[in-house]
Amino acid sequence: MSGSDVMSQNEIDDLLSALSTGVVSAEEMRVEQKQRKIKVYDFKRPDKFSKDQIRTLYMLHENFARLLNTYLSAHLRALVHINVASVDQLTYEEFIRSLPNPSVIGIFNMRPLKGNVILELNPNIIFSVIDRLFGGPGLPPAKPRSLTDIEEAIVRRVMNKALEAFQEAWKQVVTIEPRLEAIETNPQFTQIVPPNDMVVIVTLQTKIGQVEGLINICIPYLVLEPIMSKLTTTFWVASSVSKQEHPEHMQALQRKLSRTLIPMTVELGQITVMVQELLELAVGDVLQLETKVEDDLSVIIGHKEKFRCKPGISGKKVAVQISQVVMEGDDSDE
């Protein structure tokens, strides 16, 4: 995609104005679009992402869109549609130029990957969410404006939930711990990489009720560079298959479980006393337990009785001998 393909918000407004005044006709634009079928390629700025990697990012963020759709639908109690519109690569400067001012821009990291990522929400969408959460019908204000402190707190909560969905979607490729660092409203103050660095832009078409807008995720190439080999459909399929159950995986789990430490207690007996009696206890007093000398003792594993045993001595140490296995309901298969 060349720099001329990306339009700023002012350029979009000028174009819409020209269409409405009749300076430019929609028919002329269609004819020009049909005539130009050659995509400009700049050899000074080669593509960083292959078609296969773009396809993988598309599928990955389809999962993110589904998870985010589920969260917003339940949280807002409204009809929400979110789907991936496109995945493109361009320079960071081109992306920033295309954003309106004011915008709602969340800057977060993808640890252990280095660098920052941008989650940009169209003001119409975020104000619709805010209005809905405050009990309104979900309509944005007539004129775009910056967020108030209370609104920013709400946006931060929504973004953190979105990052949870983002983390879940990325599990298929790499385990990350995204953390929101800041929220900005002016794109010009958001500089996460140099202007000419390549980034991948995932655009989500979003509709909440009757309000439509875009959600953009801007991921710099430098962030994804360490895991570029994993951003392939081959790795995607392989990772999916590897997560299926196999006998060797079950054996590995059993080996780990067999080395797990658990508390084990032998209960000598029980007795019920009054608080007054407990307060009057002194050194030398004898408490008579309900257990008889010939009775088996309870072996407590965790908080449940699992065995019965006989007390005794092994060498110079106190010991018990298992005399019975206690079977209780569904615990019989443990």
Image (cartoon, helix red, strand yellow):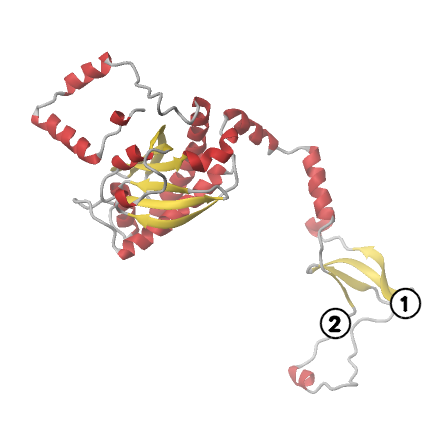
Q: Residue furthest front?
A: 44
Instruction: Give the x, y percent position of residue 56.
Output: 46, 28
Q: Nearer the viewer, mark 1 or mark 2?
A: 1
Look at mark 1 in the image and give the residue it sits on: 316
Nearer the observer, 188 or 153: 188
Instruction: Using the image, determine if residue 324 lies above or below residue 221.
Output: below
- Helix or strand or loop: what does disc 2 sit on? loop
Examine the rendered structure and indicate whether residue 150 appears above or below residue 125: below
Category of crowding for the residue at label 2, using alpha-carbon neighbours closer than 10 angstroms: few (below 14), some (14–19), many (at least 20): few
Looking at this rendering, what residue extends furthest in the right direction? 315
269 relative to 228, above or below: below
> How many labels were placed on the picture?
2
Residue at the (22%, 16%) spot, across then down: 33
Residue 1: x and y, percent? 32, 24
Q: Nearer the viewer, residue 327 or 97?
A: 97
In the image, which disc is placed on residue 46?
none
Q: Amino acid at mark 1?
A: Lys
Q: Are marks 1 and 2 in contact (CB under 8 Å)?
A: no
Disc 1 residue crowd, few under 14, some 14–19, many 20+, Cα 10 Å: few
Q: Which residue is mark 2?
A: 270
Residue 173 in view here: yes
Mark 1 element type:
loop
- In the picture, residue 283 is in which quadrant? bottom right
Image location of residue 194, percent across then percent down:
35, 38
Is residue 64 left or right of 257 when viewed as pictured? Answer: left
The residue sitting at 40% across, 49% down in the picture is: 180
